[in-house]
Amino acid sequence: MKAVIPAAGFGTRFLPATKSQPKEMLPVYDKPIIQYAMEEAVASGIDDILIITGRNKRSIEDHFDKSYELEQTLQKAGKDRILKQVRKITDLADVCYVRQKEQVGLGDAILRAERHIGDEPFAVLLGDTIAKSKTPCTRQLMEIFNKYQKSVISLKTIPNTRQNKYGVVKASPVEDNIYKITQLVEKPQNENRKCLAIVGRYVLTSDIFDKIRETEPGLNNEIQLTDAISKLDEVYGTVFDGKTFNIANRFDWLKASIEFGLETDERDELIQYMKTFIG
Ligand code: G1P
């Protein structure tokens, strides 16, 4: 299976940090966000990845490319550990790029992948979202796809105060933690209930491309992927067994930075530092 990582959005919710750098290149601890998505795809068994970029996103390509000068400098300085890390990024997967020329929505961005994907099912990992779990989120979806051979999306339960930040679904259970989706709405404004929200990981069948073409501009006058998915005949969902951080929201970035920081050698120091704010 191939993967598509859309990374073409403006990042308006994270301005001014994203004025001249892609939001997907913001670091969480010591890695840019998009590298987490790339590593998740690879850990799910995918080695052919298409990144949808746009203007001002060239640093994404540079990040996954070889950097001769840097490698030579690190080699001469005997910084072997960091050299290994830098080389690993280049060797992660075969990466292709296509640009979305106008930022007219996530659905339109995914349509740019049609030529690369053809008529095979494919995974989508939003480049601004980190999914943290033991079994990679995309792997979880691929397993359900293998059983049902239909599109599958990853979900999480959110409180009613946050539903206008996500695509939300109505669904009925078909078996343990597998739901048949009956309705999808992109960022509803007036829902007042606990919702199942789309977290930014999908396995889609290739008929999604025709459905995107049939989709009229929706919320914010953009072609919404959620609207196109709702036109598919059968879609399944599963509540993700892990945590997600949508870095487009700055508070999620802050939480992710702490969470990943706590998994490093700096854990104790970080905890001590945070304690100074309590009491
Ligand atoms: C996108 C999707 C939305 C999904 C969200 C998850 O929205 O359109 O359906 O719930 O990602 O992060 P965005 O956050 O890019 O506006």
Image (spheres, grey):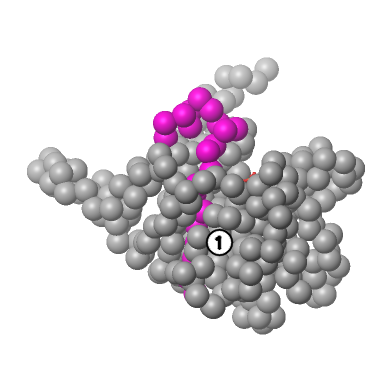
Q: Is residue 4 magenta?
A: yes
What residue appears at the point 49 percent right and 39 percent down from the top-left corner? 23
- Span of residues in magenta: 1-21
Q: Is residue 30 above or below residue 85?
A: above
| Residue 163 in view here | no
Residue closest to the far right: 192
Q: Is residue 124 left or right of residue 155?
A: left
Q: Callout 1 environment at 10 Å: few (<14), some (14 to 19), or many (20+)?
A: some
Residue that appears at 34% across and 50% down? 61
Label 1 within 8 A of ligand 1 by Cβ:
no
Q: Residue 52: horizontal and vertical position, in percent? A: 47, 54
Q: Position of residue 68 (x, y in %)?
A: 16, 49
Image coordinates for residue 251, horizontal then vertical, percent: 62, 33
Q: Viewer-proximal residue, 193 or 261?
A: 193
- Where disc 1 sits, the SS reads helix
In the displayed structure, would residue 136 be above or below residue 146? above
Quadrant in which the C terminus is drawn: top right
Using residue 23 as the reference point, say whether residue 186 is left or right of it. right
In the rendered structure, the answer to whether residue 102 lies left or right of residue 97 reads: right
> In terms of secondary structure, what is the magenta stretch mainly?
loop
Q: In this rendering, is residue 141 above or below 6?
A: below
Residue 51 belongs to the span the image colors magenta: no
Q: Please state if 22 lies on the left or on the right of 133 as rendered.
A: left
Q: Residue furthest left?
A: 76
Amino acid at dot 1? Leu
Between residue 260 and residue 8, name the one nearer to us.
Answer: 8
- Residue beneath label 1, please? 111
